[in-house]
Each structure stands twice: as C-alpha cells, then as structure tokens.
Image (cartoon, rainbow, N blue to C red):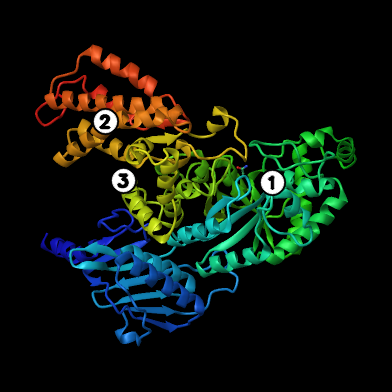
Amino acid sequence: MRTLAACVLALLPLMSFASAENMPATSLNLMPWPQKIQMGSGQLLIANPFSVALTGYTEVRLDHAVARMVGNLSRQTGIPLQTLTAQAANATLVIHVDHASDAVQKLGEDESYQLTVTPNQVKLNAPNPLGIIRGLQTFLQLVQNTPQGFAAPAVQIDDSPRFPWRGLMLDVCRHWQPIDVVYRTLDGMEAVKMNVFHWHLSENQGFRIESKKFPKLQGMGSDGNYYTQAQVKEVIEYARDRGIRVVPEFDMPGHTTAWFVGYPELASAPGPYSIERGWGVFDPAMDPTREETYKFLEEFIHEMAGVFPDQFFHIGGDEVNGKQWNANQKIQAFMKAHNIKSNDELQAYFNKRVEGIVEKNHKTMIGWDEILNPDLPKSIVIQSWRGQKSLAAAAQQGYRGLLSSGYYLDLMQTAAQHYAVDPLTGPSANLTPEQTQRILGGEACMWTEWVSPENVDNRIWPRNVAIAERLWSPADVHDVNSMYRRMYAVSDELAWLGLKHQSNPWKMLERLSAAQEVPSVKILADAVEPVKGYERERTQKYTQFTPLNRLIDSTYPESQVGHTLTLLTDTVITGQASAADKAQIRSIFTAWRDNDARLQPVLQNSFLLNDVAPVSRDLSTLGATGLQALDYLDSGSPSPDSWRAQQSAFLDQAAQHRGEVVLVGVAPIRKLVDATAQARNASGVSK
Ligand code: ACM
C-alpha cells in the first residue's frame, strides 16, 4: 500500500499537466486550445522594456510577427512597450528558429512550437517561422489583467495542429467585399491559427479580379468592384507574413454569368448576358464541347496561376443544373458522338480537360464535391459541402478531402453546432488509417447573399473561432461550456485587434433608430437572432441592391444573452442556481420586461424598425412571464394549470419569426414555465 501511495504521490506533479481530457484546469482563455499544456508556478509580469532576442534562423517575417505581437500587447495593456533586441540571456522573450520555411507556404508544413513562460523569461522555439507566428498568438492570449498587473502565467506549452488545412472561404462576389475586409479577416485568422484563405473570386453576380488577358471579365462583369493584380499580390504577401496560404477559386462551368457579360461565346446559350442580381442556382454554364472554351481557359488559368503562388487552384464545379446543355443541339450532338450519357458525365469530361490545364501550370486542382469522379487523377482535392458522406467517399476512393459541410457560417447556426462537426466523425469514423490521412481538415464558408462589408465581421466572428479550434485542437477538446467562455473572451480580443463584429452592429443600430433610445434597441437586438438556414430566401425577394440595413443584419447569428439564459435556466431548474445566478436571470428578465415602454414609440415611427414592433412587445411579455415563473419556483408551490396554458399559448405565438428575427428567450422560458408545474422544496429542487 505504502509503495502504491508513494507512486501516486510521485505522479502528482505530473497531474497538473492539463491534457486535452481534463482541460481547462485553469481559467486560461486560450483558443484554439493547445495540444499539451502544463501549468507552472508564478507569472511573468508585462513591463517595459519588453526585450526580444531572435536566435537561430532569422528573417524579416519574424521581425514583423514580433512587432505585431508587441504592438497588440502594448495596446491591450496600455504599457508603452519598447522592443529592444537583446542578448538571449537577459531578454524577456527569447525566440529560437531552426530553419527557414518554404518560400511558398506548403500544405502540411510544420507549424509546431514550444512555449515556456517562467516568472523571468519567455522562450518560444519552433522548427521554422510558422511555429513562431502561431506561438506568439498563444502568448498574447496568455496575458491577463491580474491584481499585480498584466501578466502571463508560468506555463509550458507544446503545440501543433491536428489538421494541416484550416481554412476560411470568403465569397466576395454576391456582395462585393473591399480589400480592407480581406485584410482584417486575415488578421482574425492569424489570431486563431487558421492557415488557408480561400478567395471565392467569380460568380454569377460578379467577377472580382483583374485579368489583363481578358479585361472584359472585370470590365463588364464587376460594376467596377474588383481587385487589381497589384492589390492581390499585396494581400498574398500580407497573408504569408501571417502564415496563411491564399487559394483562389474560379467557379466553373456553372456560377459563371458574370464571365459571359464580356465573353458570351463561352456560354452554352446565346447572350447577351448581364450580371445576375438575385440569389439561387442559375442556368448559364460554360460550353464544355467547344475547343475555344479550353483555349480561353488555358490562357486565363495560366495568367491566374502566375498571380497566385499557392500549390492549389480551386475550380468550383458546384451546382450545374444542366438546363443550357439540355437545350443546346450542338452539345447534345457532341454528347452522342462521344458516348457521354449524362450531364454529370459531361461535367466530368469538362473537369478532366480543366484538370489537365491546371496540372500543366504545376498546380493541384481542388473543387466542390460535385467534381468527385473516378476519371480524375488521385492528386485532386475534394471539398465536401453537401454532407459529410462525400468526404468519406473521396477518401475511400483515394482522394484527399476537406470538410465544409457543417461549417457554413451563412446558415446562422450556433457555435456549438459548428463545434460538434468533426472531419473525422460520422461517415469518416470508420476509415482506415491510410484513408484518414487523406482528410486534410476543413474550411468555414462565408457566402455573402445576405452579407455586406458592414456586417461580414459579425457573420464570421466569433463563431469562426469555434471552427478554428475544431480544426487545430485535439479531438477530445470538446467541452462546450469551456468553448463558449473562451470564444467570448477571444471575441473581445479580436475586436481590440480591429475586427468590426462588435463596433459595426452598434453603428447599425444607431442608424436604424436614428440614434433614438439606442440602448433599448440594443436590448432588443441582443435578444433576437436571424432566421436560420435558407429561410431568408422565402421571407422576401432580395437582390444585390437590397440594403442589408435591418435589425436582422445587425444582430449576431447567435445571441450571447440567449446562451447565458439557457445556462442560467438549467441551473435554476436543477436547483443549482447561486444567488448571483438568480440575480442575473432576474436582471435579464426585468430589462426585457421594461424595454418596450421606451422603445415602442421609436419603433412605431421608424420605417426601418416597425416590422419588429410586435417582437419588442413580445419581448416584454417574455420578461414578465420569466419573472412570474421564477416567483412560482421560489414560492415552492406549483403554478395553476390555467396560467401555464395561457403562457404556453403565448410562447407558441412568440416563437414565430417576424421581421426575419426570432426571440431567443422562448425556449428557456418555456422550460421555466413547465418547471412551475411541480412543487419544490426550500432549496429549489422539485419534490
Ligand atoms: C456551394 O455551396 N454551392 C459550394
């Protein structure tokens, strides 16, 4: 026994090693959570001067990364930090890099790092600069405001990503996203260790990059809203500085109306064409049977392969409805002559030709899951969006794949829903180790039918942080409460960095209400969420010209108050609510109950807000109902059946969306109302 006890005691120091399973043993706001973390004792106080020594391999990208981190630290702490390069022995931060990374960042390059913080010094080691870029973000997240001042706790972190491809796709076509949106999105990606910016550059609704070979692409297909090649090169350099690859997508043969405005001969039906202004799947598609189409693509792809240094070249390939092909006699004759039996086979023929062109330019083709076809070489990559099945199927057939199904930020799902999606679960759970290796990771997708430059930040952030963690951290890091706590902390840090997911909604609410009763408008906005999925397609006819300036556009896809309320409700119902919990839930309900009296006159007089006047009224009733339910629960006596029936009818009505928003309080308040059916003892537990 004694020996056993001695063994256990000897192991104790090791047990402070917070493995993925018992994370987070601490209150650290790291996200993505690192692979291994061991807490030490004490902390390093942030003070001026903050000296940095670069040892081993150095390059200017490391200087930039250090300057960025110290600049952010200085803004965050208010300490006017000076970076003084110092001798390693007495520097605050000692960085060691073994060797350079590749000139063009490669898929699967080592991003690992080791970070050691002691009360006297920080050591950051990595095989190449990518690991340093990742580790500096971890260090920044470690710094907290403590009673002694800003400090990083003593800690030992050994970290590397679970997946080598951790991307964010941005559609800059349906709604044009100016270059500053791209830059700040890259800043956010760096902060959460994402490493692929997938740039969706052409669509029915816009062609968004300058082609010098075919200037009518942007000249006639963009309303003047496109990036010059010089701008794109600067973006690529900026991304490289942050350890982010840039993969362009030119969607073909469908999603191509904007190409046909200037070059109608590429299409499968005669023009003329104009830029598509609405949303949906449209008929125009390239003619895969004409040699001239491939001649054009040879030149175009060659030009773009020269602009984008990344190994991968995305050709889209999604949602071809085949109507133009069916209606074209020449295409039908070609299919017959070549024994092509279906539109899918015709598209596979097209993809094969395009793949040859991409390969000739020393690039690897990637496309949406529609391109999966055994005729294509195993080198291509499949991006799975129509369900996780296609990802597993691709891996089984020998293709590498990426998961995006489940990571569509435009569907207004919760962070928890995205967080639960894992590239290696579901249909992928039973793959062989060799097949599993082919799953490279995933990408969040930001489609922009209902996303303007003004609200793109609040559509991406903070939910994308949860996806970033899913793709970086070990699979067993999946505690949802911990995720939310850290995600909201990182959300604030992203706002301090310059992302506009917190500032723009406030500005939009001020504009909506003509600056009247803005705090009350904010209470309403925080208590609702946008309608989910593709519901907005059904609520009214939208086009590229419809201003995205309503309440729905300025609310978060997921309400933080709603999340808090769900947690508080559970503590109340299980009798575990602390006095502070009870005070907080009452304060939320009271604010809701009292809001409408101030707000209703503003809503009544506002063209932009009067469609949510009934929502505001219901929010007040919800608050009152919530308070009554709490009173019943506190009293210990059950509520009358008639009261519950009345509340239930009200809740059914309040659950309907109006003004394209839904009230987040309905479900938790229904739970509270239902709970009042039972008598409770003094500690609030049902008898
Ligand atoms: C897609 O969402 N059509 C790839």
Disc 1 and disc 3 in contact, CB within 8 angstroms = no
Helix, strand or loop at disc 2? Answer: helix
Helix, strand or loop at disc 3? Answer: helix
Q: Which residue is mark 3?
A: 481
Quarter location, residue 254: top right
Q: CA distance from mark 1 to mark 3?
A: 38 Å
Question: Earlier along the polypeptide chain: callout 2 or callout 1?
Answer: 1
Q: Tell me: is circle 3 under 8 Å from ligand 1.
A: no
At label 3, which amino acid type do we have? Asn
Q: CA distance from mark 2 to mark 3?
A: 30 Å
Q: Which residue is mark 2?
A: 594
At label 1, which amino acid type do we have? Gly
Tell me if residue 677 comes above or below residue 173 in the rendering: above
User: Crowding at label 3, few (<14), some or many (≥20) Cα neighbours within 10 Å?
Assistant: few
At label 2, which amino acid type do we have? Asp
Residue 519 in view in this figure: yes
Q: CA distance from mark 2 to mark 1?
A: 52 Å
Numbered tag placed on residue 30 in the rendering: none
**In the image, residue 346 lies at what x, y percent?**
79, 42
Tell me if residue 199 comes above or below residue 121 in the rendering: above
Q: Which residue is mark 1?
A: 317
Give the position of the N terminus as an image quadrant. Answer: bottom left
**In the image, residue 457 lies at what x, y percent?**
47, 50
Which residue is situated farthest in the left direction here? 682
Q: Left or right of 454: which side holds 482?
A: left
